[in-house]
Image: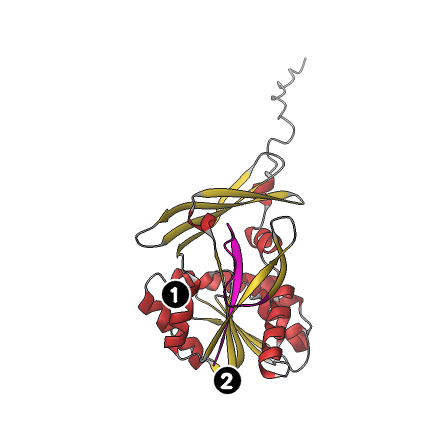
Amino acid sequence: MVKQKAKGRARPAGRFLKTLAQRADRMVLYERAVHDPVMEVDFLQRVFREARGRQPRSFREDFSAAASAACEWARRGPQRRAIGVDIDPAVLEWGRRHRLSRLAPAARRRVRLVNADVLTVKTRPVEVIAALNFSYWVFKERAQLLRYFRNAWSGLARDGIFVLDAFGGYEAFRELRERTAHRGFTYVWHQASYKPVTGHLLCHIHFHFPDGSRLDKAFSYDWRLWTLPELREVLAEAGFRRVTVYWEGDDGEGGGNGEFDPTVEGEADGGWVAYIVAEK
């Protein structure tokens, strides 16, 4: 009689399945949660048209990461050309594979991705340069920020504009976590520490998933929390002749409505987001 081999233990169902966090692409989650290139390009077009009376054609996206705004810019017409500049080659490659590749071939040829430091990069002059998502706050010293602003000034055409964003309000100085539910995940904005003497602000982005898994510190930011008066003064010193702050309107429920208009004062909100438009 042939002796049968003992059967091994049954493996628990799903034992080797990856969690939602393990399967997630942090770049996709970031764009779904906080980045709206269509809205950004709409705003850039609008403020240039209001300042110069014509549609802009050329754009440089500093701290571009995946260059989603640069791709959106080029997508809008055959006269549009764009440059994406970032110091991290890995995120530029992600953008090349996942964003640039989605454009029609003709539009793709009008986008140039540059792996360089925005402090020293030299590109063909453009009508609009933008440094958004508070990315330039990586410059913690005034002299370094001034150096960047001067380089941006040099990269603009004769009548170009430089667009930044900023946030503030008394909640900006707090250590806090804010949770926002999205389809398939929860976005967590974490202000981990703030140092009043230096203005240094450490922030993280976490993503939480319905299966209980988490992607903690998917992105981390070691910044200085710059105020609007400081930014306006440094921009003027860099050579910009006029600096305008665009303030977000109220949605009636204590939040922003996504519409930005010029202001000379602003409001004492707990948390606000604004654009700064500097004209060469």
- Report the magenta residues as a range: 261-280
Q: Residue furthest bottom?
A: 158
Q: Amino acid at mark 1?
A: Glu
User: Residue 63, relative to residue 155: is it above or below?
Assistant: above
How far is the residue under mark 2 from the one under mark 1? 25 Å
Question: How many C-alpha atoms fall within 10 Å of the one at disc 2: few (<14), some, or many (≥20)?
Answer: some
Residue hosting label 1: 230
- Res 124 visible: no
Closer-to-camera residue (187/231): 231
What colour scheme governs how the chains and residues are painted in the rendered image of this protein? secondary structure
Q: Amino acid at mark 2?
A: Ala
Q: Is residue 232 left or right of residue 14?
A: left
State yes or no: residue 264 in magenta: yes
State yes or no: residue 212 in magenta: no
Residue hosting label 2: 157
- Res 79 visible: yes
Q: Position of residue 185 (x, y in %)?
A: 62, 43
User: Residue 3, relative to residue 262: is it above or below?
Assistant: above
Question: How many C-alpha atoms fall within 10 Å of the one at disc 1: few (<14), some, or many (≥20)?
Answer: few
